Image: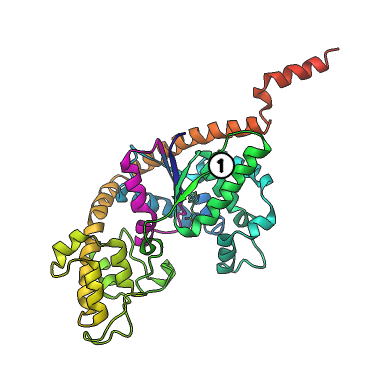
Amino acid sequence: MSNIILTGDRPTGRLHVGHYVGSLRRRVELQNTGKFDEIYIMVADAQALTDNFDNPEKIRQNIIEVTLDYLSAGLDPDKCHILIQSQIPELTELTFYYANLVTVSRLQRNPTVKSEIQMRNFETSIPVGFFTYPISQAADITAFKANVVPVGEDQLPMIEQTREIVRKFNQTYNAEVLVEPDALLPQSEACMRLPGTDGKAKMSKSLGNCIYLADDAADVKKKIMGMYTDPTHINITDPGHVEGNAVFTYLDAFSRPEHFAEYLPEYAGLEELKEHYKKGGLGDVKIKKFLNNVIQEELEPLRKKRAEYEKDIYGVYDILKAGTEAARNKAGQTLSEVKAAMKIDYFEDQALISSQAEKYSN
Ligand code: TRP
């Protein structure tokens, strides 16, 4: 069996460090292992429109932002296809057929949809497009026969729903057309749930608590020096808490032993730093400065690469166009197999046509 990755993001804003440690960094590593036959990275604009249908301009502007974030993080158009979801009509067609295999009550039980409905105050009037986006996400994944889907844990219900659709399809149409995907979760708790700089669980543009991949060095430093730590750690000598302390969660996600050797050689590693903080005698400014060094070192190469791509936006659109074309090709093949399995391939089925001709010939 081929080894195929598909994943993607809704283009509703620039990507931040939460996206980076939660998925983007991993995608680049997977890409560079050379172990995958095909890699598809989707800018999920059609899905973004399911709850932004009245603001298409926002989605349209953010397609290039997300793509620049992808490219600057190291996704390489020679190794993966970056595609725009809405430009692949085959996905919409698959969604329509898969919808027959899913019940309303099953969609209502999808925990991600449930919490999003609450968040958006959709309880009394849920747009059908939004309600059914898990089906469209199943189309995204299966169109490319992806077996590996690197995502955050909030997406697990989507993968589960996709697996159910795959089983139901293959069983109903007695075919082995679709592939059951597995989610690939982030490596650690901190990567899975990176908090905002204010310590709040969710990073969001409206809360102003995100460090964006495209932020310049001065902005990043300012955000880090203003980060939430431990409100009970008032004097340096006070014992401190590392759980729920955003700076330490960020260090969990970003710091490596080499960083200590380079910037904080008086500590053997993160565990020793945490112990000192818990005991008391270690100030917030010191850990923030360290975090700043670590994050700047990680983000600087991205900023450099972004600046290069920003000089050639025409070229970036060409990358998207080529990626979308390749993706459309693949989705078209899958759609043909799906339609054949469902027996809706009338014009390709010469046996059907000739048997009916025969039936009426006498
Ligand atoms: N739902 C994903 C998100 O909100 C985006 C997405 C769309 C996706 N289609 C996908 C992710 C297919 C993985 C696979 O970020």
Residue 130 vs 319, above or below: the answer is below
Front in this rendered view, residue 318 or 183: 183
> For mark 1, does the 10 Å Cα neighbourhood hold few (<14), some (14 to 19), or many (20 or more) residues?
many
The percent position of residue 355, horizontal first and vertical second, equals: 76, 18
Residue at 15%, 62% in the rendered image? 261
Residue 63 vs 357, above or below: the answer is below
Residue at 33%, 72% in the rendered image? 246
Quarter occupied by residue 192? bottom left
**SS at badge 1:** helix
The percent position of residue 314, horizontal first and vertical second, equals: 34, 42
Kind of residue at badge 1: Leu
Q: Which residue ends up furthest to the right in the rendered image?
A: 362
Residue 124: within the magenta?
A: no
Residue 10: within the magenta?
A: yes
Q: Work out whether residue 69 can be spotted.
A: no
Residue 322 vs 29, above or below: the answer is above
State which region is magenta. 9-38
Quarter occupied by residue 130? bottom right
The percent position of residue 293, horizontal first and vertical second, equals: 20, 65
The percent position of residue 36, horizontal first and vertical second, equals: 38, 38
Mark 1, residue position: 91
Q: Which residue ends up furthest to the top in the rendered image?
A: 362
**Which quarter shows the C terminus?**
top right
Front in this rendered view, residue 293 or 68: 293
Residue at 38%, 69% in the rendered image? 195
Residue 291 vs 322, above or below: the answer is below
Quarter occupied by residue 167? top right
Residue at 35%, 58% in the rendered image? 21
